[in-house]
Image (cartoon, rainbow, N blue to C red):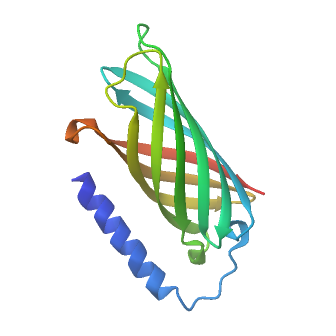
Amino acid sequence: MMKYFICLLCLGLVGLTSKLANAETSPGAFAAGQSQLSIGGGTSSIGDGSYLILQGRYGYFWADGLVAELGLQGGVPLDDDLSSIYVFTPGVTAYLYQLGVVVPYAGAFYQYALSEQPLDETSAIGARAGIVLRQGGGFLGLGARVTQGIECGKDCRTVSPEFSLMLSF
């Protein structure tokens, strides 16, 4: 069900992009040369445990609306017998800034996990999509992310919500 939602969201973004091709809107905080700092979090099930996920990302816009990012996530165990997990995540995200206050986004990423406990999968690829709301000098993001382990099947696929607060400078 979620894969259909993500496919429909991506098709909608493609349709909006074609309609906005002639729009003359300033990229503002999404302009080439701008930097972006994002913090966020959520929850996730990893293995047999539940984790509170805290994340930070730094991004640099190398083209209007297109940012290259480096992120670090920390998984804080919600169960006493688990150890923390740290995840390094480089990626790319595109923003449709032409819409004004509501800015849809879609992106792709790779992630590598480190932990004291044995993990079934340490490398994964994924996709993310959602919207960002402009709020003064900052942005509030809400979306979803799908992560697929590289060396395993559907058992290693997770879908999770994504909340973020972004600052641009």
Q: Measured along the vertical axis of the image, is residue 82 above or below residue 47? A: above
- Residue located at (60% from left, 58% from top): 68
Whether residue 145 is visible, yes or no, is no
- Give the image location of residue 149, x and y in percent: 32, 40
Residue 118 image point, x, y percent: 37, 18
Residue at 46% x, 31% y is 113
Report x, y in % for residue 153: 21, 40
Give the quadrant of residue 61.
Answer: bottom right
20 on left or right of 5: right
Quadrant of the rendered structure where residue 152 is? Answer: top left
Is 45 situated left or right of 115 in this image? left
**Please, which residue is most extreme toward the top here?**
81
Q: In which quarter of the view is residue 135 placed?
A: bottom right
Q: Which residue sits furthest front?
A: 151
Q: How many marks?
A: 0
Q: Is residue 50 above or below residue 21?
A: above
Residue at 47% x, 51% y is: 109
Quadrant where the C terminus sits is bottom right
Q: Position of residue 31 (x, y in %)?
A: 70, 71
Q: Image point 32% across, 60% down: which residue?
A: 6
**Closest to the observer, 56 or 125:** 125
Is any part of residue 85 visible from this angle?
yes
